[in-house]
Amino acid sequence: MTSAPIGIMGGTFDPVHFGHLRLAQEAAEILGLERVRWVPAGQPWHRVAPKAEATHRLEMVRLAIVKNPLFELDDAEIRQTTPSYTVETLERLRGELGRERSIVVLLGTDAFRDLAAWQRWRDLFALAHIFVAQRPGHSLTPGGVPAALAEEWRKRAGTPTVLRERPGGAIVTYGTTALEISASAIRAHLAQARSPRYLLPSAVLEYIEAHGLYAKGNGAP
């Protein structure tokens, strides 16, 4: 592999917070990623609709990552008018980056546990690696995931080194910093007129306040 891997950080980011940012930063350092591409979901098919409109979520991510040279923004899922699927995003990126470039999807433990429910989830491994960030106190074992996913995990378990040697196909788990922050808790704070300061970047909080996002009576939490 001649080039460093590219990390993919997807999600609704409703709103983006320090937990997301720290996961991406640590993954970039652990894996030696050239960069992390953030891909906010437009219409995620597998969960309830985000509370904030897509354009707001895109701008919040832009504000959160703009000063980090490792991070870049991808608005393709926001722009499309149909539900967004990770496998289709990876097919698009594979066409853009070529067949040999290592692509790594960055996930938290909760998202990884649900992986077998994703659209064409087994096809993901032909397109990318999966990196699972395990926070201290959040153990993850094959016995704690669906049987089909556990079987894939056993076959594909690897180390960070593997991600730099092949374009895709491995599952790597790695311990990361514990930040007990969730978007739903931030939305609840705002709905109750409580400050979520220090849970998310100041620029994002200022944007939320300027646009009245997540306030009580505005779809929160």
Image: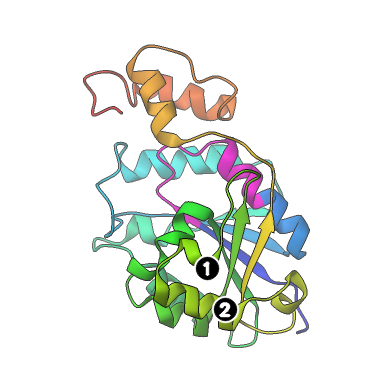
Mark 2 Cα shell of 10 Å, populated few (<14), some (14-19), many (≥20): few
Residue 204 x, y percent position in the rendering: 51, 30
Q: Is residue 210 left or right of residue 217?
A: right
Nearer the observer, 106 or 68: 106
Quadrant in which the N terminus appears: bottom right
Which residue appears at 53% of the width and 43% of the height?
A: 62
Residue 45 x, y percent position in the rendering: 26, 60
The magenta segment: 10-24
Which residue appears at 33% of the width and 45% of the height?
A: 54
Q: Disc 2 designates what residue?
A: 154
Report how many numbered discs are placed on residues in the image: 2
Amino acid identity at mark 2 = Arg
Disc 1 versus disc 2: distance between alpha carbons? 8 Å
Query: Could you tell me if the residues under marks 1 and 2 are in contact, i.e. CB atoms within 8 Å?
Result: yes
Is residue 89 depicted above or below 174 in this figure?
below
- Which of the two labelled residues, at mark 1 and mark 2, occupies the earlier sequence position? 1
Task: Label 2, secondary structure: give it.
Answer: helix
Which residue appears at 38% of the width and 38% of the height?
A: 56
| The disc label shown at residue 142, or none | 1
The colour scheme of the drawn protein is: rainbow
Visible in this render: residue 97?
Answer: no
Amino acid identity at mark 1 = Pro
In the rendered structure, does residue 23 fall within the stretch colored magenta?
yes
Which residue appears at 37% of the width and 60% of the height?
A: 77
Is residue 68 depicted above or below 78 in this figure?
above
| The disc label shown at residue 206, or none | none
Q: Is residue 45 left or right of residue 148?
A: left
Residue 155 x, y percent position in the rendering: 57, 83
- Quadrant of the image occupied by residue 63: top right
Q: Is residue 51 left or right of residue 140?
A: left
Q: Is residue 163 left or right of residue 114?
A: right
